[in-house]
Amino acid sequence: MGCFYCDEHHEGREAIMFKVGDMKAGTLYLFKDQAHKGRCALALKSHKKELCECDEQERNDYCADLAAASGAIKKLWGCTKINLGSFGDSNPHLHFHIVPKYEGGFEFGGSFAITNPEPVILKDEEYKEMIEALKKELNL
């Protein structure tokens, strides 16, 4: 296995997420576990682990991508709040988890668990519909 985010086909990544599309500085992925409907990750395209390693243009572009993706998720699925988390101590790509939270829903008002004890797995057609909706909303 090579790079989790750079490899066209990476077994580990493909086991947990689908590629939605490339944005200006990042690539958006939809998680297979949809316990938080609309949960995605936005990975920086370059091999940098920290936001502070980006030059001003890359940082601004990545943050704009993050804002656009978060806004699209909120608009499409009407969540109460978007939580953002940057994880991955050993992954060479800065990436943020975009976690929609719904009042009265799973983990609302609490912390976020990266791996859910009871994942919500959808039908292939449902993932396809979500990906197409994101692509349309983000013009990808």
Image (cartoon, rainbow, N blue to C red):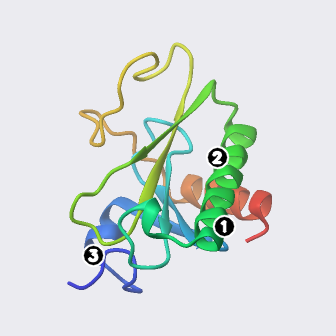
Task: Name the mark nearer the viewer: 2 or 3.
Answer: 2
Q: Amino acid at mark 3?
A: Glu
Judge the density around disc 2: few (<14), some (14-19), many (≥20) Cα neighbours within 10 Å. many
Q: Amino acid at mark 1?
A: Asp
Judge the density around disc 1: few (<14), some (14-19), many (≥20) Cα neighbours within 10 Å. some
Q: Answer with left or right where residue 26 lies relative to residue 68.
A: left
For label 2, the residue is 70
Helix, strand or loop at disc 2?
A: helix
Helix, strand or loop at disc 1?
A: helix
Q: Which mark sits nearer the N-terminus, 2 or 3?
A: 3
Instruction: Judge by depth and name the residue closer to the eye, 11 or 110.
Output: 110
Q: Answer with left or right where residue 42 lies relative to residue 66.
A: left
| Alpha carbon separation for disc pair 2 and 3 | 26 Å
Q: Residue at x 67, y 37 (%)?
A: 77
**Corner quadrant of residue 129:** bottom right
Q: Give the percent coordinates (x, y) of residue 96.
A: 46, 53
**Corner quadrant of residue 12:** bottom left
Q: Residue at x 35, y 25 (%)?
A: 111
| Alpha carbon separation for disc pair 1 and 2 | 14 Å
For label 3, the residue is 11
Q: Which mark sits nearer the N-terminus, 1 or 2?
A: 1
- From the viewer's perspective, is residue 1 above or below residue 59? below
Which mark is on residue 61? 1
Q: Give the percent coordinates (x, y) of residue 92.
A: 31, 72
